[in-house]
Each structure stands twice: as structure tokens, then as C-alpha cells.
Image (cartoon, coloured by chain):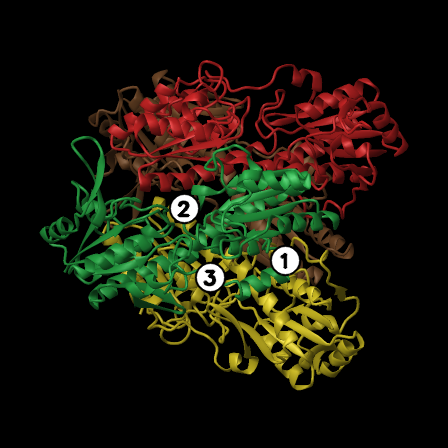
Chain colours: A yellow, B green, C brown, D red
Amino acid sequence: MRIAISTGGGDAPGLNAVIRAATLSALSRGWTVLGIKRGYAGLLGDDEVIPLTADTVRGIAHLGGTILRTTNRGNPFSFPKQQPDGSWVEVDRSDELIDNARNLGIQAMISIGGDGSLAIAQRLVEKGMRIVGVPKTIDNDVAGTVTTFGFDTAVQTAIEAIDKLHTTAESHDRVMVLEVMGRDAGFIALHSGVSGTADVVLIPEIPWRIENICKAVMDRDRSGRKFAIIVVAEGATDEKGEASIIGESMPGQDRRVGGIAQRLAKVIQDRTGKECRSMVLGHLQRGGMPTGYDRLLATRFGGAAAQAVADGKWGHMVALQTPNIVTVPITEALRTPKRVDPSHDVVRTARAVGISFGD
Amino acid sequence: MRIAISTGGGDAPGLNAVIRAATLSALSRGWTVLGIKRGYAGLLGDDEVIPLTADTVRGIAHLGGTILRTTNRGNPFSFPKQQPDGSWVEVDRSDELIDNARNLGIQAMISIGGDGSLAIAQRLVEKGMRIVGVPKTIDNDVAGTVTTFGFDTAVQTAIEAIDKLHTTAESHDRVMVLEVMGRDAGFIALHSGVSGTADVVLIPEIPWRIENICKAVMDRDRSGRKFAIIVVAEGATDEKGEASIIGESMPGQDRRVGGIAQRLAKVIQDRTGKECRSMVLGHLQRGGMPTGYDRLLATRFGGAAAQAVADGKWGHMVALQTPNIVTVPITEALRTPKRVDPSHDVVRTARAVGISFGD
Amino acid sequence: MRIAISTGGGDAPGLNAVIRAATLSALSRGWTVLGIKRGYAGLLGDDEVIPLTADTVRGIAHLGGTILRTTNRGNPFSFPKQQPDGSWVEVDRSDELIDNARNLGIQAMISIGGDGSLAIAQRLVEKGMRIVGVPKTIDNDVAGTVTTFGFDTAVQTAIEAIDKLHTTAESHDRVMVLEVMGRDAGFIALHSGVSGTADVVLIPEIPWRIENICKAVMDRDRSGRKFAIIVVAEGATDEKGEASIIGESMPGQDRRVGGIAQRLAKVIQDRTGKECRSMVLGHLQRGGMPTGYDRLLATRFGGAAAQAVADGKWGHMVALQTPNIVTVPITEALRTPKRVDPSHDVVRTARAVGISFGD
Amino acid sequence: MRIAISTGGGDAPGLNAVIRAATLSALSRGWTVLGIKRGYAGLLGDDEVIPLTADTVRGIAHLGGTILRTTNRGNPFSFPKQQPDGSWVEVDRSDELIDNARNLGIQAMISIGGDGSLAIAQRLVEKGMRIVGVPKTIDNDVAGTVTTFGFDTAVQTAIEAIDKLHTTAESHDRVMVLEVMGRDAGFIALHSGVSGTADVVLIPEIPWRIENICKAVMDRDRSGRKFAIIVVAEGATDEKGEASIIGESMPGQDRRVGGIAQRLAKVIQDRTGKECRSMVLGHLQRGGMPTGYDRLLATRFGGAAAQAVADGKWGHMVALQTPNIVTVPITEALRTPKRVDPSHDVVRTARAVGISFGD
């Protein structure tokens, strides 16, 4: 058997551990393993396919990033192509991709990626390719699996930032607003906010009102706790369904300048008179060494992916259904995205220990 | 309502986060909260009961240890008592404990502890006390819950040690034997060994043969990888059900001198001719700041314990049944201890990526 | 003897270790110790003076921030005062401060602060107060001392960020621009850039040209290393002495929007066609637990400050002149600020290992 | 020019950063660089010489260990040789080493090692080889340089262990004895003990009396602080110049069984009645990622070593004389080993903040 592995979408801590475990598991079955560079795009370019051996994957389990590189572009069904006049159009190169894979002797593929990559995998499976998926999402927003690798590390990075901001906020009696990842799902903000004992947590699933946020800050202030930590997911909005404070924060400014944290800090400072500062955690959340939790989960996913190939589970992805690794159809996992349930015990406990969601 | 909280047994990272969340959740219900120091013993001594307020539990969620102190002694059903002649006997002081609790106005209690503390809680419940349990085991050996707080931190500490030993082992072409906690359950060794990419993992659930361990080391050596990392749970034994290498490692020595790691290093060095070193991770595994995972789980357990008190779940403990926190009867949880299942996917993947269990 | 301790200016990891060591050293001499909250302002307000005892300073050596709080405002020689019409003026309240200190029985003071706080200390000494200084600057820009506490921690935080950005930059073939502290002195950027093996380091002491930065990025690209890490001190500018790329980066925009990292990323992306991302490390550099180096240095500074009080070294500050702690006159330390010497071996080695300074 | 680099003795965090900086600095001068594996022994064996290029040293600055491997054996002046009868003798193979180096075209060598390696380098220089030294000692016991790389990392590792032991010691009212490296010099114990706020610090330079240690523990106990942290350097002894407590700790036992920490814990428990536990930090101190401080220092040392080769400083080693890197004759550096000065401000401040040295 000759299989290929690729990684697509934004990188997440643990990708290399998946690659290593899948490769070693495949080799232990006597298979040959190829690595496709830069997601699906690697099957449409030159010099992008490398052999994966025990030597290639040695010592990478604890490294961030991916030795196979990745990209946010390169959907073979709408691949960017430059026209003679210099403009760009998108063309369907999926047949070419399937041909190239066949010419390389690839009999099956393990595609590690987010919902975008998994959707592509599903379409390729429908065209006859034999692909098994491994879900990757730093936001924890893919359904069908309790969690995925990279999320625990991102939360840990956010907690360490909150811990650091705590001491400086307290020393200066300041309000610190920390923006973390989470365009649609607030898991990173929620988990890091509860673990880091933030005072306010703002997530896309619970629309906030600016009055409530300011009230939470001032209630603390009156009780003698002069500082506050606010954790906000990048996609959190107020109840009008959009960031209505934009106008208030920077009159006349292009709304694309600055992020939610910067705007919130501006408005809260104006309204409460307290010194506010903001910080965007950004790419730090993707980088670095995975936590032990993520290293283990990624290794299990890699091993299970090789098993799924052996079992012919095309169109399935591996998933954690604690305490087991299972496989679920990709279509099922993509049907409904995962979101924070506002009635879940994490949210209820957060409220009980005094965290405001601004609602 | 007036409730009390106590912590018993060896400490585990996250205890303070449980105390904080349970206290704040109780206070938010309008209850009064007392802290009992040093486990059940605090109800049998003097000056060991303190009020727990928002101020008392402020800023403790990320701290290791327990502000309520703990002890491995102090079972009220067989409490040590010194006789006039200086010798010690054990007496049943459970009735006295119940009286003292009643005199303090304690209407319900949250007991955070391991299987020993939970068994005592159950017996006190049978005598009429109203107790809710929170499971605490750094080894992850309590059934009824997917995991408990402290375990993830202990694994992370072990992984960081393995990472450090890797570089020095490789530089010197040495075999390093790392002993981690796990008298009866090998979860810490297994999870840290897989995540840290150890070469040999020895756990109580899979008896090893010294020949196989040495073979794994020499097979690596012959393939050009001159070093090896062995992770051994303190309770791992060879297939004869006891540490039969004792005699070989230190002829004529008292078998209580030195631990399994030191003995294994001695025997492997003698048999393979390779330089071997050992290290006992010991108390480092209990100490320090809990990981984000453990901070969140401990906070959820604390909140759920207060809820269980509100629901009158006497004789129940809170438990993680992913993704929910539930309550299970203590008797049920204690019926069968949790052990590593040798056919679980973690063990199978470990083997697939080349880890030897010495079997 | 009755002494007081205060902390002023931006917080830096190690402040609490100084407070603790100075307090314990003073107590061991039989002195009484007061803590003044919020810098000099604490002597001009209410309820801002607390006793410092062994209990007060217990367990704080490893904590970030300052238990005495701090402020960037509150110069007693030009103290903000609100007029009846609501406007603000600045008044000289130094005599009032001296009176208040005398009324509190304060015979000597240890003032921990940056160049601003030290300059104020010097003026108060000239008016008769007995003050010893402890230099605090996260940027390492105070002369007279080899380094100060907080700097090593800030550099470590920056290095950890660079490490994290490395893996994600490499996975995506991106250029990452990291902005670190350093308005006038580039030590944090230089030390973290060299230690973190950045590719380009931009500091205020070496003006850059945007062409050179882009050339360094593209030279790497052509040699097959498709990613690059750029570390820029917040005060670094091009050779025209100001951020001339402002116009290019955001035509028509207010120049106060966005920082140097964001602008650089924009221009480099436009000029090279490579994906660029930016990140501002900001307050993370001030927060959190001090490194061992800083804990030791801060403890030594605290002990030396108490000694300096005993020796009557008014108007002096403690300083590291390796391997000894000495005292130097504050006026001397403030005469010339410390800057990176472009001919120093750190810069020369940086160039030798391939780092571009854009010059 | 064709130069070679080797690493000898126990590994220390930062070795790879030295190798990288020396290699890149040499390459930037147009030189060729060879790496000799396993210290001097690599010049006496087979297949132990590799080319060092920009690719070879890429991404190693932050890795612990040494890509050139190392060994504690292999002095060419007394090299182990097996006799026909199976016994071992030591022979002088220095002439052979010099011949081999000449045959490889090596014109100069950078030898990174401790006092043993440096002494060998000096003898080889006296026989005509052109060698520059880079001092490496995790204990900080080499004179002529303020410090060396690896020491800061070892201290940081020890501090993190102390921090972890603190919480568990306090929770259980226990005495924890932590053994750190330092056969002859107590710098690691002193610096980590002061930074980690240990209660007792025992170092080779200050002989202790067991009575004083127990008194320090019991004085704390009486003041209500029921736990204590003792940091002991492996070479610390009582005032009789040897570990006289051996007999008391384990009557009838071979004195080689167990280390100083284990014995101290036994005796202190027997004498004070308090629960004592011990831990040996061991190889953790050598392993892992160097701190930022060590990465920078190691990089500077590597760059300065290449410069010293260019300057023909044979028989010199690079050294830190803050704030500069200089070169000093190896003979001078080896004349007197560096030890903790009991009258130094670090020791005096340690006493002032309440640390007992048991004297």
C-alpha cells in the first residue's frame, strides 16, 4: 500500500505529531508513505511530494507547525489561475489532482485539515479518491469530535497571557482587554477566561451589551477591586448582531482599522473613566510546542487515521468520543458546526464564580 | 445553608481551584462556607475551621497545593491515639466528628479526596452526614469519571522531564530511566511516554520481562540510535508479579533501598553494557501550577459540587462524563478501580509508533 | 529606624522581590517598614500607607506586579490638580509630601523606579529627604548599572513569542513582524532577536532603510527559506529619523493608528509580494513571574538598598557592576541614558550569524 | 582556513548555540568548518568527523544537548585501551590525534568544554596545535569568566522545582530536601535557593552542622510555618569535612547508597519528628531548552571564538567580563577554580532575608 499525507488550512500545534504517528503506523504495516506539501496544492505543483520515513518524522512530535507546510489557499475545485491579461480566475483542477495522485501511485490519502479541507476531501471522495480525514481546528468548532489537537495548547497560551496581564493590570488599576481567536465559536475565550479567572468573557454565542460590560467593571471597582480582565473572542458582537460600538470607538474611521479589543478598550475607557489597554494574542495561539494533552491526542489521531485507511473508511474522519477514538462520516461532522452551548455547565459555573458575559 | 469543604490525601494541582469555585458558587446562593483544615482530622482538633469568603479564595485558582492543607492520615474510623504507655492504638472517632460538625452548624459537606477519603465520606453518609464528594487522584485511578484534575498537570510535568532527558541522553548515548507515579495504574507513564516519545514504557497493567527491555534498547542501538528513554511507573513489575530484578540489581541489599528506576538502570547497564542513568520524578508531579485543562476541570467540579449539595446528592461524587459533569454514587465509583486497558487505542498506537512495553 | 518603600512608573517583573528583600533586610536590623502605595502619590493621598511585615511580604518574591501598586503619574513637583472650572493644572506639592513623610515618622525611603522616579528622588533629596534609589527599567536603558531586574524576563517573554511565531511562519511561508518594547533603547529587540534567531532586528540605535529589510527577506526567499522573522523595537525608525513609511503603509490614515509592526508588515507585503503578519507583544512583557535571573537580581537590589540606607547613601541608587552590587549617585546614572552600542560584540556577532539590521 | 569544533564533558544547555554561532561566524569569513564528534575521541576513531554548514546548524540554537555528541571519557593523553587479556590500560594517543587533525586539514580548533577539556586543550597547544577554548560548566566553577552558558538554565530548572515543591510541602506541613548539582561549588544551590526563597541552603563552601539545620526547621515550625524547603548542593558537607551523618542516617549501609538529600531527610525527620521528603534533581539540570540568557551568552561565545581563531589566540578561552566578551589564557583560568565567596553580597542578602546556611 502506498499512502499520502497532507496538511491544510491554518497551522495548529500537534500537526507534526499526527504526521509522525500516521507515518510510523503506516510503516509498521509495511506501507510506503508520501508527504504532500502545502495541502492539496502540492498535488498540483512541482517538487512538492516527499517520501516520509522513520528518519523524516524523527523528533518532530513536540514541534509546532507542520513539516509538510500548509496554506489557506489551494482548493482544487476553484484553484486560482492567472489569465494572459494578468487578472485571476478560479478553475476546477480536481481531475488533474486525481490524475496526479494516481500517477504517483497514491492508493489512499490522509488529509489533515479544518472544515474547508474536510469538505474538499469529501468532494474528492465522491469523485473516487480514497481519503480519510483528521479534523484540525484551533477554535474547537468542528462537530463530531469532543475536541481536536491544538485547542488545548491555544487555551494554555491564552491562560498564560491572562496570568501575565493580571499582575500588570492589578499594579496599575487598569482594565485589560485580551482578544483571542474564535470567529464563530467562543471556546478559547470561554475556557481560558474561566481557567484564568477573567472578570468578563465575551463570545459569539452570547451577544453582549456595552452597558453590562461597563457595569461589571464598575461593580468590581466599587468593591475595591480596581482592575479587571476582559477576554473577548474575535467574533464576539453586541446584541445587534454586529459591532455597533465601532462608530462610538473611532468616529469617522474605517471600521477595518483595529480589532474588537482595541475598540472595546476605547469605549470602556471613555464610559468608565478607567485606564484601559488592549492586546491581540493573534498568531501566538497557533505557534509553539503542543501541550501534553495535544501531543497525545494528535498521536492517537495519527494512529487511528492509519487504522481507518486499513479499514477503508473513505470519507470518514477520526474523532474523539471520550474515551475512544472513532470514525465518523465527514458529511455528518460538517452538517452542524460546534458552538458553545450557553446552558452548558462551563457557562453556568462561570456565572456562579462571578464572570460576566455582558448579557 | 451552612456548608463545609475539606481536602484529604496527597495534594494534586487543582485543589485550590475546586475550593474557590465551590466556595464562590455556594456564596452566590447565599450560603455560608467553612473550610476544614487537614481533611477529616480538622473536625477532631482545635483551631482548624476557618470561614471561606470571596476574599479567602481570591487569586488561588492557579496555585498548586491546598489552602486547607491536607494529610494522608486522619481516618476518623481508625484514628491514631497515644496510650498512657506511649504506644499508639486506633480508635473510632466518627461519632465525635459528627457531633463536632453538628455543633459547628454544618448542614452539608464537600469532601475533596481520593478513594480513601471517598470511602470515609460514604461511611459518614451512612451514619447520617450529608456529604458530596469530589474525586481527586493524580494517578487517574478512580472510576466513574473520565479523568480528574491534577492528572493532566502531572503528565505535563513528566513530559517536560522526558523532553529534558532526551537531549542529555542523546548527547551522551545514554539510557535514561525515569520513574513516575502510578502504584497500581500506569496512566501517567503511558500518557507521558507516548506524548514524550519514550522508547520503552513500563506500567503495572502490562508485566515486563527484562530481556525484552534490553532487546528494545539494543535494537535501537544497532539501528544507530544510541540512546533510549524508558518511563516506568513506580508500581510496574515483571511478569512474576514482583520486582524479581531486585536480587540481580543489588545483591545483598535491603530491597527497600532504591526504587524501580535505579534498579532497572543498574540491571540494563550490566546486561547491555550501555551507560544507564535513573531519575525519580517524585513530588514534582504533585506540585506547581495546574495546567489550563486542570484549572477548568477543577473549577467545573467545584461548581458542580455546590450544585450537588443544592440537589441533595448525598453519597454522590461529581464526575466528568465528557462533555458533561454528572454525579455518580460513591459506592459505584469505588467498586472497581480504573486501570489502563492494554487493548485501548492509546496502547495500540503506542506500539504502532514503536514503543515497547517490555512484554 | 522607620523606613518607607515605594514603587513608581510602569511595573516590571521583580518589583515584589525587591520589596520583600528590602523589607526583610530592614526588619532583620530591627527597623520598622512602611509601604507607600502608588508611587509618590501615596504620600499625597489617603489610606495609601501600609505596614510591611514578614507576613505582608511572604510568598511574593515570584509574583509579577507590585503589592504597592504603581502609577505613571504623580510627580509631586507637578501634580495634577483640578480647577473649579473643571480644567487641570499642575502644582508643586513636594513640600506637602515632605511634611506628610515627616508626620508619618519616615526617616528614610527606598524609591524603586525608572529614570523619572529617580529624578524626582534626586530633587527630594536636594530638599532634605533621605532617599535611596533602586533602578527599574524593563528596557534596560538606565546607565550606571549593567542591567536591572525585569529586563531578563521581558527578553525571555519575547524569545518565547519568537519561538512560537517561528513554527507558524515557517508552516505558512510567511514574514512575521514582532514589535517589542524599546522606545529609545533596542536591548529587548536585540537580545531576543539574537537569542531567538530572528532574521532582521530593527532598533532605535541603528536606523534602517526599507529597501534593505526587503532585500534581506528576498535573499532568504531565493535561498529556499521562504519565511522570515523580523523583531522591531517600538522606537525603531528609518534613517530619516522618523517613520517615513507611514505614508506608504496607510495613505490618508491618521499616523497614530497602528504601530510600527503593522505598518512594516503592510509595506513589506506590498513590496515583496510575500504574506506578512504583525504582532505587538505589548503588556505581556511587563507581566508574569520573573525569571530566576531577575528574582536573584531583585533580591540582591532589595538587600543592598537596605544596606545603603544603613550607610546613609542618600541620593544614590544601587547598581550591578558585575559581580558586585554597588551604589552610584543618581545624578551620575541619569547623566547619560544607556543605549545599544552598534559596535558592541552582540551586534557584531548578530551580523556574523546572518542577522540584518536593515542598515 | 579550515577549522574544527568539538564539545567535551557533561552536556550543558547552550552547546548547540555555541556550535551554531561559531560555525556561521566562520562561514561568513569564508572558512570551512568540521565538527568532531564525542570530544577529542572523535579524532581518534572512525566516521566521527562531519562537515558543519549553514544547513547543519539551522534551527539548533534553542535545542539542549549537542549535535556533536559529547563524552566524559576520551582524554587523548590517557586514553583507555583494552589489552589482549581483556584488562584496560591508559595510553597517550595525543600524537596520533595531532596527526589525524593534520591529515584532515584542520588548521585550528574550537574546543568547547569544562576544566578537564580545557586542560587537555592547553596541553595540545603546548604540543603545537592551534586551539581556542570555550568554557562550559553547568556549576559555574570555571574562573576567568563571570559565568558560562548552561548555568542560568540549570538555576532556572532548580527554581521551578523549588516552586513546585513549595506548594506540596506547605499542603502537607512537610520538610522537602532538594539536591542540586555542585560537587565543589554551590552556585546553583545558592542562586536557586535565594531566588526560590528556600529556608535552608547548604553549599560546599559553608560547612553545616546538623543541629543548626534542625534548629532552623523548628524555629519556623514554632512561628507557625510548618513546612520548610532545604536546597543542598551534592557536594555540601558538615563541618568535619565529610558527610558525618552517613552513619546516623543508615546504620550498616554502604555509604554509596543514596545521596546527601536522602540522608539529610532521614536524619532531620528522626531528629525533629517532622515528615521529611527528598528529591534529586539530577539530569534535569543539564537538559532542555536554554534560557534566553544562556542562548545569548552561548551565541556571543561562539562568535567570539571564531574571532579568537582569526586573531590567533591559541591557548586562550573566551570569557565574559561584563559587559564584554574577552579572551583569557587557559592556564590563568585554570589556576584557581571559582567558588562561592561566603562574604559576597548574595550570601549576605540571603542571610538578611532569613535563609540559614546551617553554619
Q: Residue at x 65, y 74 (%)?
A: A310
Residue A167: image x %, image y %?
Answer: 38, 46
Instruction: Left or right? Give the position of D320 relative to A198.
Output: right
Residue C345: image x %, image y %?
Answer: 67, 32
Q: Residue at x 44, y 46 (%)?
A: B285
Circle 3: element type? strand
Return the mark for residue A180.
3
Circle 2: element type? loop
| Chain bearing mark 2 | B
**Which residue in the protein does label 1 denote?**
C169
Q: Are marks 1 and 3 in contact (CB under 8 Å)?
A: no
Instruction: Left or right? Give the position of B287 relative to D318.
Output: left
**Which residue in the protein does label 2 denote?**
B286
Q: Is residue D273 above or below residue A313?
A: above
Q: Amino acid at mark 2?
A: Arg
Q: Quadrant of the N terminus of chain A?
A: bottom right
